[in-house]
Image: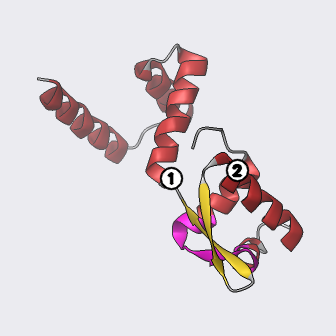
């Protein structure tokens, strides 16, 4: 996925990351409780995501079935890197420090970070 996705497009992706392939009507149904989008709006968002390379669609009779072309993890990596680039000169440490200060870290978070740091140190040797 080369282009950044909007918050609305992310909601579509979230549905399809949870389950795919899905038809536009099913995606709209899954979003009905959290949005007031019409089927036309959902189809427009799906089309935009196909154009951006985030989704692919395959014909299924008179409809299309949509599936992500990028994983949630890959999207998260790109979005995090963009954020670090824009706000922290591409450096990860200030980004993590900012998140820690603003959200607070649980003991479990700290343990996970310590484990990750140790793994990264081993891998860089």
Apparent side of residue 86 relative to residue 25 in the rendered image (left or right):
left
Q: Earlier in the sequence, mark 1 or mark 2?
A: 2
Whether residue 79 is visible here, answered yes or no, is: yes
Residue at the image point whose x is 12% and y is 30% from the top: 122
Residue shown at 48%/18% (left/top)?
90
Residue 103 position, x and y percent, is: 54, 37
Residue at far top of view: 89
> Percent from the top left, x then y, of residue 114?
25, 35
Residue drawn at 56 percent across, 28 percent down: 82
Front disc: 1 or 2: 2
- Our reading of the magenta stretch's main secondary structure is helix
State the quadrant of the N terminus: top right
Tell me, yes or no, whether the highlighted magenta stretch contains residue 19. yes
Crowding around mark 1 (Cα neighbors within 10 Å: few <14, some 14 to 19, many 20+) is some
Dot 1: what SS? loop
- Apparent side of residue 82 relative to residue 63 in the rendered image (left or right): left
Disc count in the image?
2
Foreground residue among 111 and 31: 31
The residue beneath circle 2 is 51
| Cα–Cα gap, marks 1 and 2 | 13 Å
Tell whether label 2 touches label 1 (CB within 8 Å).
Answer: no
Q: Which residues are the magenta region?
A: 15-27
The answer to whether 64 appears left or right of 76 in the picture is right
- The quadrant of the picture occupied by the C terminus is top left
Residue 70 — which label? 1
Q: Secondary structure at mark 2?
A: helix
């Amino acid at each position: 996925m080369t282009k950044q996705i909007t918050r609305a497009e992310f909601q579509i992706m979230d549905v399809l990351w949870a389950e795919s392939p899905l038809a536009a009507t099913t995606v709209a149904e899954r979003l009905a409780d959290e949005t007031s989008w019409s089927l036309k709006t959902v189809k427009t968002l799906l089309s935009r995501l196909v154009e951006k390379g985030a989704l692919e669609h395959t014909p299924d009779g008179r409809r299309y079935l949509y599936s992500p072309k990028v994983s949630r993890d890959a999207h998260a990596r790109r979005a995090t890197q963009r954020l670090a680039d824009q706000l922290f000169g591409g450096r990860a440490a200030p980004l993590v420090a900012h998140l820690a200060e603003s959200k607070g870290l649980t003991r479990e978070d700290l343990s996970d970070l310590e484990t990750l740091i140790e793994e990264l140190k081993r891998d860089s040797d």
